[in-house]
Image (cartoon, rainbow, N blue to C red):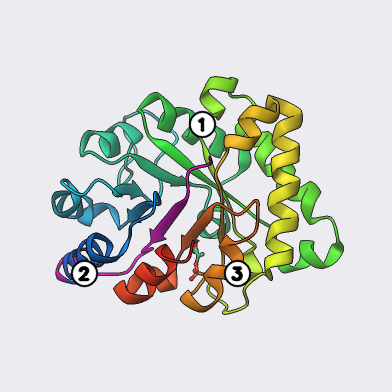
Amino acid sequence: MRQKIVAGNWKMNNTLNEGLKLTTEIVNMVADEVRGDVKVILAPPFVLMPQVKNLIKNVDKIYLSAQNCNENASGAFTGEISASMISSIGATHVIIGHSERREYFNENNAQLAKKVDLALVNNLTPIFCCGESLEIRESGNYETFICNQIKESLFHLSAEAFSKVVIAYEPIWAIGTGKTASSQQAQEVHAALRKYVAGQYGDAIAENLSILYGGSCKPDNAKELFACPDVDGGLIGGASLKSRDFTDIVKSF
Ligand code: PEP
C-alpha cells in the first residue's frame, strides 16, 4: 500500500499569529475527523517552522516540511537555509523544485539534484515537484518534458535513496489559476511517471512511490482526483490556508 499524503504549501503567507491559529485549527480538526492512514504535512515559511513544530510535536499524523533548501551544505550564502538546519528543528520533509522556485529563482534540474542529495543526507524526505507550462502542454510533449525533469534531478540516486523520495506532479497552468487538471489528465501523467520510474528502478520501487497531484486542488475536486489509481494525494497551495478546506481535502480519500 502506497503512503497517502496531503501536504499544505503555505508559500509566503501567514504571520506568526496567523500561522499558529491555522496550525491549531488543523491539529484539532485532524484529531477529531481524520481516521485513515493519511500523512498530513504542513510547509509554513521558514520563520514559522519552529513554532509550528511545537504545536504538532505530539500529533502522530502531522509532519513538518520546508518549502525549499539551499543546494550547498553550509557557508557564505546570506539569507539562505540549509537542509541540515531544517532537519535540526525537527522537520521531516522539504519541497524541492516547486515551479515558483524554477520560474522566479531560475532553479534548474542540476541544481535541484544537489538539493535532493542534501535533503536525503540530512534525513529529509524530498517532495520533488515537476510539471509543464501551458505552452508545453499544448505542444503535446509534456510527458517527455516531465520525465526529463525527473531523470535530470533524481535518476542519479541509488535505488535505496530514490525509494525515500515523494514526487508531486504540478502542471504550472493549474497552479493558483483555478484550472484543475481533470482526473483523466492527472492519472495519465501519474501513470506515465510511474512507468518511467519502473524502467529505471524496477516495478517494486515504482509501485511504492507516492505521487501527489498539485494545482488548484480543492475540497470539491479532491475526491475525484484522489480516486485515480496513480494519484496518492495532493500538494495543496491556496486551499491549505483555510483549515476547513485543507482538512476536507485530507478527508477526501
Ligand atoms: C502549489 O503551489 O503547490 C499549488 C498546488 O497551488 P494551488 O493549490 O494554489 O494551485
At 41% across and 33% down in the image, what residue appears? 119
Query: Label 1: which residue?
Result: 114
Task: Determine if the magenta segment contains residue 9.
Answer: yes
The residue mark sitting in front, 2 or 1, is 2
Badge 2: residue crowd in 10 Å (few <14, some 14–19, many ≥20)? some
Q: What separation in Å lies between label 3 and label 1 (alpha carbons)?
A: 35 Å
Location of residue 70 in the rendering, given as x and y in whole percent from the top left corner: 40, 39
At 78% across and 51% down in the image, what residue appears? 143
The answer to whether 162 appears left or right of 47 in the picture is right
Please, what secondary structure does the residue beneath circle 2 have? helix
Image mark count:
3
Magenta residues, as a range? 1-17
82 above or below 41?
A: above
Image quadrant where residue 14 sits: bottom left
Callout 3–callout 1 Cβ contact below 8 Å:
no
Location of residue 175 in the rendering, given as x and y in whole percent from the top left corner: 56, 69
Please, what secondary structure does the residue beneath circle 1 have? helix
The residue mark sitting in front, 3 or 2, is 3
Task: Determine if the magenta segment contains residue 194.
Answer: no
The residue mark sitting in front, 3 or 1, is 3
Amino acid type at image mark 2? Glu
Name the foreground residue: 116 vs 234.
234
Q: What separation in Å lies between label 3 and label 2 (alpha carbons)?
A: 25 Å
Q: Is residue 135 visible?
A: yes
Location of residue 103 in the rendering, given as x and y in whole percent from the top left corner: 57, 59
Query: Label 3: which residue?
Result: 224
Image quadrant where residue 29 sits: bottom left
Image quadrant where residue 178 sits: bottom right
Badge 3: residue crowd in 10 Å (few <14, some 14–19, many ≥20)? some
Q: Which of the two discs, 2 and 1, labels the residue nearer the N terminus?
A: 2
Query: Label 2: which residue?
Result: 25
Amino acid type at image mark 1? Lys
